[in-house]
Each structure stands twice: as C-alpha cells, then as structure tokens.
Amino acid sequence: MRIGELSRRSGVPIPTIKFYMREGLVSQGERTGPNQAQYDEDHLRRIKLVRALVEAGGLSIAAAREVLVLMDSQVTDLGVLGKAQYALTPRKEEPAEPDEAGRWAAGRVEELIDGRGWAVKPTNPARRTLADALAALHRLGQEDFAPILREYAEVAERLAAVEVEAILRRPDPAAMAEAVVVWTAVGDTVLGSLRRLAQEAESARRLGPAEG
Amino acid sequence: MRIGELSRRSGVPIPTIKFYMREGLVSQGERTGPNQAQYDEDHLRRIKLVRALVEAGGLSIAAAREVLVLMDSQVTDLGVLGKAQYALTPRKEEPAEPDEAGRWAAGRVEELIDGRGWAVKPTNPARRTLADALAALHRLGQEDFAPILREYAEVAERLAAVEVEAILRRPDPAAMAEAVVVWTAVGDTVLGSLRRLAQEAESARRLGPAEG
C-alpha cells in the first residue's frame, strides 16, 4: 500500500509516520519510484504498536526505540519478556549519596519484596523507581501511606497472576513479547485512569457529587 | 535559611531550585542583600512537593504548575480535590473524527462506568484517557484484555475506597488537597512499580527464574 493508505488505516498522520521512520521506530518502505514507496501489513502493525506505546502509553521516542530494538532482536527467547519489561520502567541514576529518606525507602522496598516472598532480581529497575516514590512520600510526611502501600502490593500480585496467565496463553514468544510491551505501557494508563474514575465515584458516594 | 540549607534539606540542587523559582513553581525568598535571600519552612515544604510531583510522579513542569496554582488558589473548598485530580490526568485533544476503534472504546468506557454504578462527571478527563488506551489495544487485536480490564476496575474500586478514606481523615482542606495531589501523581508510580515487581515474581513462579 502507499503511505496515504498506511496513514488512513493506522490513524497516524503522514508527517508523524515519516517522523517515526526517521527516528528508526518503523522501517522504510520499498522504493518504487523517486517519490514513492510501498508498505505492507507489517508496517501497518508496527505503526499501530508505536502509536500505542507513544500515545496511549506515554513513552518517550527514546524509550519506545529501546523497547522495539529488544523486540526485534531476540523474540525467540522468553528472556526477552523480562528485558522488555525492564526497558519499560522509568529509571534514574543513583544519587551520589542517598539521604535519610532514600535509605529508609530502600529498606521498605526490600522488606516488602521479602515479606511477600517475591523472587525479584536485584537488577529490576522497578525497585529503584518504587524506592524513589516512597522516599518522596516520606519527605512530605505522608506516613499514612503505609497501609495503602500494603493494599497496592496485594492488588499488584492479584493483577500479575491474571496478566502473566494471559501472556503465557499467546502462541509464540513474538506474540508474548508484543503483549508484554503493550500491556505494560498501556496498562499503566488504563489502571491510572480507572483509579481516577473510581476515586471520583467514591468521593461522590461519601460526600455527595462535587459542584462545578 | 539560606539557599544552601534549602538545597541540603530538600536534596534538590541549587540550580534546580532556581529553575523552579523562575518557572513559578516556588516563590522567591525574601531579599536580604544584593545576592542573598532568606527562605522559610514553607519554601522547604514546597520544594519537596515539587520534587515529588516532577521526579517521583513524572509530571511535566507545566502540569506541576497547573496543579500547584489550583492548590494555592482555593484550598478552603473541597471542590478543589476534584479539580486537582483532573489536572493530574494526562489529556489529549479530541480527534476531528474518531475511527472505529475510538468509537468502540468510548462505548466500552460508558458501559464500564454504568456497569459499576460509578457516579462520574462527563467532564472527567480520565474517561478520554481510558478510551484512548482501550482503542490502542483494540487496534492491535489485544482482545483478551477484556477480562483483565474487569480485574483492573475491581481493583481500582477497592483502592479508591482506602485512598478516599485516608484523604478524608486529613485535618483540613489544604492537607487533603496536598494528599490528593501527592498520592495521585506518586501513586501511579508506586502502583506501576509494584505491578512490574509482582509480574517478575509471578513469571519466576510459573517459568522458573529468567536468565541474565
């Protein structure tokens, strides 16, 4: 198909498709003339995937590229699932010297993982992301977050059981990797939106509907 | 205190504090000399709050500013809680004409909200964010996400009950607004990290620990 049809069927404007190609997220089409190229169903699927990661999942172009390179390189191996998931976790460099809140939070993360009996590698970047978030709450004295954290951990465990079950039902590692990538990125957005809707509903139930 | 102490106690580098002031996220200190200013505990708390929103919550400077302006303007009124939460929801402009996936997803969101009996205003931006995410999954044929979506909705309801309960225990609307803002932004990060940790643990349980 031509780029116009690719745009129409993916819902992505032509300049954005060209941008994705320049950024290496989508491969070039097959040249059929000086100003013309042909694209196939693989291009279409890839553009939908990029759109899902960048628009619905809120990933940066750099993060999307890192994830897609992983997916392209080693989808015959189940180890790619973990690597793809790590690439989808926001990371920060370690501070030179963690402050009191940082040390406290790192300890809480270890306790939580041990307490639930989770087998999680020391290299999983979500340890650090979680510790940073807990440190921020601690610095602001939001200490009553602790019981809510326990609820979150229980809920995460319950969701992980359903999610991993669904992923493993996929026919091959490539399909599993795509589902991991899409669900991890888009799943954050889905869960965040549902939390906001449920919070408004719960507030209305407790306080009556808000005005304005 | 001087800016050096403000930096030490908040863990935020001096150039970043100056950047926050230029961007209007933190008010200027009281000038005590040509190159000197004094800051108080309110400045310190505000810098910790900005750090939590921008670093741990992943908000843009513009989104953080919008939220903080709301918090500053009307913290005597409980209506600010809903407005602050709306300001913390990623939004996009409506497309000129939604495609088939977009229309399907909008219908699913209405069904879900009605099905759970949630009282949610038509203006809640999370409706649209959720619909965009579901449309992306639909375009990629990830149809088996539907049962997982039900789990997510149940879990969101359970978390909202605990969260709203904790918020309403705060002594005054200003403290409630701060908790809403911090927990909404940082809570997304906490839940996202826990999901990733739990997914790795569940995969290890099902498949044995991954190599590498």
Image: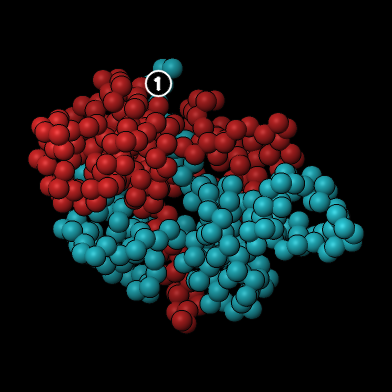
Chain colours: A red, B cyan
Q: Residue at x 73, y 58 (%)?
A: B45
Estimate the x, y position of residue B105 in percent, counting from the top left: 23, 59
Residue at image position (40%, 61%) is: B91
Mark 1 residue element: loop
The relative height of residue A204 versus residue A35 in the rendered view (above or below) is below
- Which residue occupies 11% across, 33% down? A33
Q: Position of residue B207 (x, y in %)?
A: 34, 23
Q: Chain of mark 1?
A: B
Residue A58 in picture, x, y percent from top left:
40, 48
Give the total number of marks visible in the rendering.
Answer: 1
Viewer-proximal residue among B68 and B185: B68
Mark 1 belongs to which amino acid?
Answer: Ala
Outermost residue, bottom side: A211
Outermost residue toward the top in this view: B212
Q: Pick whichever, A104 or B127, lies toward us.
A: B127
Residue A89 in the image: state x and y as whole percent: 46, 37
The one nearer the camera, B35 or A70, is: B35
Report the front residue among B87 and B16. B16
Q: Is residue A4 visible to us here? A: yes
Q: Quadrant of residue A46?
A: top left
Q: The N terminus of chain B appears in which quarter of the rendering?
A: bottom right
Q: Is residue A6 left or right of residue B119?
A: left
Quarter containing the C terminus of chain B: top left
Q: Is residue B187 visible?
A: no
Quadrant in the picture for residue A69: top left
**Outermost right residue:** B33
Q: Disc 1 designates what residue?
A: B210
Toward which corner of the image does residue A200 lie, by quadrant? bottom left
